Structure formats: C-alpha cells, structure tokens
Image (tube, rainbow, N blue to C red):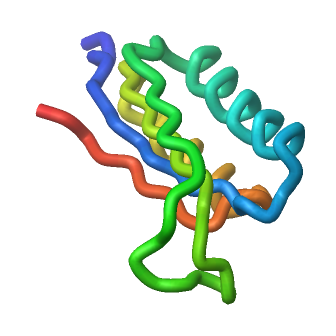
Amino acid sequence: MPKINGKYETIFIVNATLSEEDINAVVEKFTSLIAENGEIVKIDQWGKRRMAYPIDDMPEGYYVLVEFDSKPDFPAELDRIYKITDGIIRSIIVAKE
C-alpha cells in the first residue's frame, strides 16, 4: 500500500539577533528543504515579534509559519534538522486534519 501524504504545519523561531542576511538564509534553508521533500501550501513570515518570555535572554524572535504536504516520515527528519541548526530558537510541527 503506498504511503499517503499528510498535511502539516510548522512554525519556527529564528534568532532575531542575527543579521537580516543570516535570518533570510535560515528561512530559505528550511523552506527549500520542505519544498524538496513535499509541497508547500503557504509560507507566512510574521517577522520580528516579542516572545511571551525570554528564551536564552532573547526577548524577540523572527517567526515563520509554513503549511505543507509531505510523506509521514519527513516531519521527524525536519524536527531533527531544526534541533541541530544554530539559528533556530524554537520549533514545532503539527499534523493538520
């Protein structure tokens, strides 16, 4: 039986103290990674926003929301790459109904 693509939503927060070029490079890295392994439905860059509480003494982060379709095994790999990337402060991946 072939694997069915699932609908997912991810939001990641990039370190806002990075330069604008570095922030754009991190965003491009993840959007291209998602596009290679699935189909991007929507990208919504919220920009710099104040976080509810400081993380690593940083009061602000650069927020990016991506909705995508992919095979069920890709979100685990995406999460692994989020965790080993220096510019990412926080991330979450959610399966949509």
Asked whether the viewer can see residue 80, the reply is: no
Residue drawn at x 46%, y 12% as measured from the top left = 39
Quadrant of the image occupied by residue 3: top left
> Would residue 52 appear left or right of 50 to someone viewing this image?
left
Work out which residue is located at the far left of the displayed protein and give it: 97
Q: Quadrant of the N terminus?
A: top left
> Would residue 49 appear left or right of 69 to someone viewing this image?
right
| x and y, in percent, of residue 58 in the image | 66, 79
| x and y, in percent, of residue 62 in the image | 61, 52
Residue 17 position (above or below residue 76): below
Asked whether the viewer can see residue 8, the reply is: yes
Residue drawn at x 32%, y 33% as measured from the top left = 8
Residue 25 position (above or below residue 31): below
Q: Nearer the viewer, residue 89 or 57?
A: 57
| x and y, in percent, of residue 32 in the image | 68, 21
Residue 71 position (above or below residue 84): above
Residue drawn at x 39%, y 23% as measured from the top left = 68
Q: Quadrant of the C terminus?
A: top left
Q: Nearer the viewer, residue 36 or 41?
A: 41
> Would residue 47 appear left or right of 81 to someone viewing this image?
left
Residue drawn at x 67%, y 85% as measured from the top left = 56
